[in-house]
Image (cartoon, helix red, strand yellow):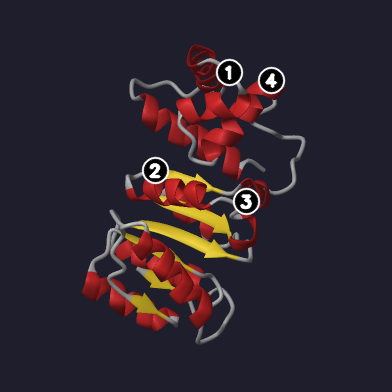
Amino acid sequence: MIGEDSALFREGLARLLADAGHEVVAKAQDAPGLIAAVAAANPDLVIIDIRMPPDLTDDGARAARRIRDTHPELGIVLLSQHVETRHSVDLVSRGRFGYLLKDRVFDVDDFFDALQRVAAGGSALDPEVVSRLIGARRAADPLASLSAREREVLALMAEGRTNVGIARRLWLTGRTVETHVSSILAKLGLAGSEEDHRRVLAVLLYLNRP
């Protein structure tokens, strides 16, 4: 499903998705209509612009939080020209979430890969979005013990990359990435038996550090 007030962009995105074999079950041009349409159509994934009517401020982001409350298993992707931080950290923390910037989507295959990751329960965050969400670095940094390479690995984890995806991006072996991830979790004091759960906690520390 698509929530987008620009008719040209909305219809172009719908055609792109349909040509790739996806079914667009509904389209909405304002936030109230988006919320109602999600309830009626029950989609697997919803793509939302942030600035939508009626206020043309952060209506899309606010609608995304309401949708997440009522549809916790729904994949949500914010696709916008703007970076919104007030609602996005909460959405990131609850998973099945992506945030991509329209002007930085350079490859259609990468775009579809991001949508598939979110629909499958993962995340997909543009690096610029990650940078804005974590804000300015301060002295009391919980990640101070991490090496430069470990910070790179953690930043890619925050984008929703798997170990395989991180290995490809940094030109490392899968075993080396596993070693870095284990070291990151140990240095951050994230004990536990479930690796995926600890990865989420590490990403939240990264996004919420002071």
Residue under pointer 4: 147
Residue wearing tag 2? 122
First in sequence: mark 2 or mark 1? 2
Disc 1 designates what residue?
172
Question: How far apart, in angstroms, are the residues tagged by discs 1 and 3?
Answer: 27 Å
Drawn side of residue 205 relative to residue 149, left or right: left
Say which of marks 1 and 3 sits in front: 1
Q: CA distance from mark 2 to mark 1?
A: 22 Å
Crowd around label 2: few <14 · some 14–19 · many ≥20 (10 Å): some
Badge 3: how crowded within 10 Å, few (<14), some, or many (20+)? many
Asked if 60 appears above or below 148 in the picture, the reply is below
Q: Earlier in the sequence, mark 4 or mark 3?
A: 3
Which amino acid, mark 3? Leu
In the image, residue 195 lies at what x, y percent?
38, 24
Report the mark closest to the observer, 2 or 3: 2
Q: Residue at x 54, y 23 (%)?
A: 167
Q: Position of residue 92 (x, y in %)?
A: 47, 50
Q: Secondary structure at mark 4?
A: loop
182 left or right of 81 in image: left
Residue for badge 3: 133
Circles 1, 3 touching at the beta carbon (< 8 Å): no
Image quadrant holding the N terminus, namely bottom left
Above or below for 191 versus 39: above
Whole-percent x and y of residue 145? Answer: 67, 21
Residue 188 drawn above or below residue 64? above
